[in-house]
Image: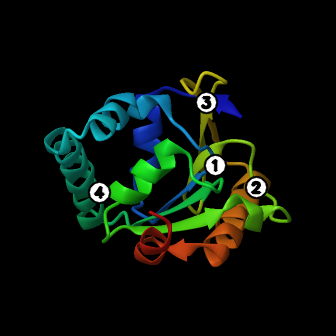
């Protein structure tokens, strides 16, 4: 594993050749989203929509450049307040699946959230305070294979975004 910067993470993930990015999220809360969470919590729909529009636009731009994106969120149930927000504001057009944590007990998963290409993995390290603690990169074939298999396993158990949202919020 190699520690890298946020700028290097973007270079690796969105460099040539363009390919699908798969994201595996394993935590129930992220401090990086504090302002979004606080806006949602206080009912500031304008701030929430502005943030979500920026996320949708960035994803659409990357997809247009040849970087399709799929995401799996493993969540504890009942949902935390943070995850209730995430379900409520999720883009209905995003290729996103929600997996109750109880369904992945026998699925080998990496110890950290990760973004996966066919040839590399970038791990987002989060500390106990929910703050970003670092970024690691690996192109080791066994690590890439493990993370791809973990994503496939979680994806196969996941509930599509709209279906999960309508049954949980």
How far is disc 4 from disc 3 in space, using C-alphas?
23 Å
| Residue at the image point whose x is 66% and y is 48% from the top | 139
Q: Which residue is mark 1?
A: 26
Q: CA distance from mark 3 to mark 1?
A: 10 Å
Measured as percent of width and height from the top left, residue 73 is found at 56, 57
If you read the primary sequence from the N terminus, does the residue marked by circle 3 or circle 1 appear first? 1
Q: Which mark is residue 59?
A: 4
Circle 3 residues within 10 Å: few <14, some 14–19, many ≥20: some
Mark 2 lies on a secondary structure that is loop
The answer to whether mark 3 and mark 1 are in CB contact below 8 A is no
Which one is nearer the viewer's eye here, 55 or 121?
A: 55
**21 on left or right of 57:** right
Quarter of the image with the C terminus is bottom left
Mark 1 vs mark 2: which is more N-terminal?
1
Q: Secondary structure at mark 1?
A: loop
First of labels 3, 2 by sequence position? 2
Element class at badge 3? strand
- In the rendered image, the vertical position of residue 43 relative to residue 4, given as above or below: below
Using the image, tell me which numbered label, if any, was put on residue 126. 3
- How would you rate the neighbour count of disc 4 (Cα within 10 Å): few for under 14, some for 14-19, many for 20 or more? some
State the residue at coordinates (54%, 59%).
Answer: 117
Local SS, label 4:
helix
Q: Do tag 4 and tag 1 residues touch (Cβ < 8 Å)?
A: no
Residue 109 numbered tag: 2
Q: Which mark is residue 95?
A: none
The answer for how far apart the CA atoms under marks 4 and 2 are is 25 Å
Q: Position of residue 75 (x, y in %)?
A: 61, 55
């Amino acid at each position: 594993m190699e520690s890298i910067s946020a700028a290097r993470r973007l270079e690796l993930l969105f460099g040539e050749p363009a390919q699908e990015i798969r994201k595996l999220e394993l935590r129930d809360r992220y401090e990086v989203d504090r302002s979004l969470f606080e806006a949602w919590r206080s009912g500031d729909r304008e701030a929430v929509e502005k943030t979500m529009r920026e996320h949708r636009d960035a994803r659409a731009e990357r997809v247009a450049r040849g970087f399709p994106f799929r995401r799996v969120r493993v969540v504890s149930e009942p949902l935390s307040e943070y995850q209730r927000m995430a379900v409520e504001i999720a883009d209905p057009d995003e290729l996103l699946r929600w997996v109750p944590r109880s369904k992945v007990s026998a699925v080998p998963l990496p110890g950290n959230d990760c973004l996966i290409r066919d040839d590399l993995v970038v791990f987002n390290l989060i500390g106990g305070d929910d703050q970003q603690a670092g970024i690691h990169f690996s192109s080791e074939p066994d690590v890439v294979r493990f993370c791809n298999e973990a994503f496939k396993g979680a994806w196969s158990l996941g509930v599509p975004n709209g279906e999960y949202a309508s049954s949980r919020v």
